[in-house]
Amino acid sequence: MKIIDPYKLRNDFPMFQNKVKMQGRPLIFLDNASTTFKPYAVLKAVNEYFETSTANSHRGDYDLCYNVDLKIDEARQTLANFIHADKREIVFTSGTSMSINLIAYGYGAKHLTKDDEILITQAEHASNVLPWFKVGEMTGCKINYIPLNDQGKLVAENLKKVISKKTKIVAVAHVTNVLGFIIDIKEIVKIAHEYGAIVVCDGAQSVPHMPTDVKDSDVDFLSFSGHKMVGPTGIGVLYGKYALLEKTAPFMTGGGMNAKFDMCGDVTYLNPPSKFEAGTQNIEGIFGLKAAVDYLQNIGMENIRAYEDELRAYALGKLKKNAKVVIYNETADSGIITFNVKGVFAQDEATYLNSQGIACRSGQHCAKILLDYLGEVATVRASLYFYNTKEDVDAFVSALEKGGDFLDAYFA
Amino acid sequence: MPILLDPQMMRAIIMDHYEKPRNKRTPTDPNYKMMHIDSPNCIDDIQVFLREENGVIVDCAFDGVACTISTASTDIMTELVVGKTTSEALYIIEQYQKMIHEQPFDDSVLDEAIVFINTHRQAARIKCATIGWDALEELLDHRHEKK
């Protein structure tokens, strides 16, 4: 029995139903690590807010407003259940970047000193590197790197080699955005906790594709974005253990996050998560994200994971028959396939794929590990999701067979 | 006169300049002006070098990391402008930019650069086809400002 029927699921997505074309050809979307298509259910949830239930949240004395508060609360509960957290531990943000910045400025800059250390890896996305550089600038703490193994993967043994009592924060992606390795986050957390460090997990590439259980992994903070999991752009989540959120300073101040203040400058902030949600929130985004999570849970995260695994294996099997294709992450286990076509510059290959209606991403993917671990300045990344089909893969594979003719894109 | 717009020939010219760029090097002579330019969209991260004597371009070169389109287009440019006066070079650059952006242009001065005439079909690559040209224009314009 099929785990997932992508053809049936495509009926739920306007981008498929509208038969969107690119370069005059049926669109084959293999850039799901960047963003994802949205099902009608998400559009409906967003539109409902605009069409029949517009009001601001907080302290409204009328029904519409009260209902918005109720629905935000309901969405928070849905997100909490989705990752096995408590509702009070779910902070709505604009996405992963804002979530990590919130921890960096609100927790890192507040609690770290010049004698402390933050450990990251060279495989991190810029949004899990640059905020920590800022913390380094502000506190004088050191930013050091956990060495990756020879395939570019973070393994727990390597954390053991470098972690010390000075380490206060370990900031790593559960799934890295270029090579797509799934790390043993539970083991990483266990080691970090033995040294009294907290783990800040970037879940942007993991939460959309597999079951997430923050109780089981015991991560201290987890960030993810709605738009990479069939939700709207501009909405995401910061999960934090409640005790840590209490110790985190608000990144932004303003309305909706203070309990009271006076002219002497005495301010009392609300408790988490409200403390972090200053100003009017992205209310339609929150409703859209809830609908996205409902949609994913209806399919089942285990099923999504299993299907992507199967589709990845199918793609690799075919790609390996093409001697011109170099795959850089064959042993990875997510839907991310990183490759080059011999003799063709990565972006030229992506341009050629564009001319065939195939969306892939080329370049350094905001991570700078490529030179060190791959010996390549740039690669092409194809990233799968549950709505991709074997036909998508077939079209992609057959386009790559002609990969040497990338200048066709100019002269076809 | 422009070369014939035969796709096979156009393709061969791009690949030839990519694989064997004529002027991809970093001059050590301090009389060169240099402009660093990179692209947020592509890997392109190049330096363009210019040496002028008495208002005439005596050498133009580039170096750095660049894709096929940017390497070939920049290399062709370096060959085109040597021996030209500043205003002649600026005129060539202007015609090239017009061609890239699908406006009427004077093809008599573009020579091999005509091979990039279809760049608009892959709009994401316009920056690659113009990055070196933008840098040279900047270098030449600076000279004007100093006057």
Image: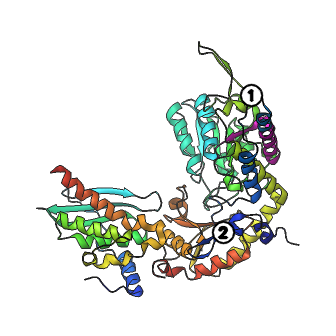
Q: In the drawing, what numbered circle is on residue A330? A: 2
**Residue A98 in sight:** yes
| Residue labelled with disc 1 | A59
Residue A331 x %, y %: 68, 66
How many residues crowd around disc 1 within 10 Å: few (fewer than 14), some, or many (20 or more)? few
* Label 1–label 2 contact, CB within 8 A: no
Residue drawn at (73%, 73%), measured in percent from left and top?
A389
Mark 1: amino acid: Arg
The CA span between labels 1 and 2 is: 53 Å
Q: Quadrant of residue B93?
A: bottom left
- Colour scheme of the picture: rainbow
B62 vs A239: above or below: below
Res. A222 in view? no
- Residue A74 is inside the magenta segment: yes
Quadrant where the N terminus of chain A sits is: bottom right
Magenta range: A70-95
Q: Main secondary structure of the magenta part?
A: helix
Magenta stretch encompasses residue A97:
no
Which residue: 75% across, 54% down?
A: A44
User: Is residue A266 rendered to the left or right of residue A409?
Assistant: right
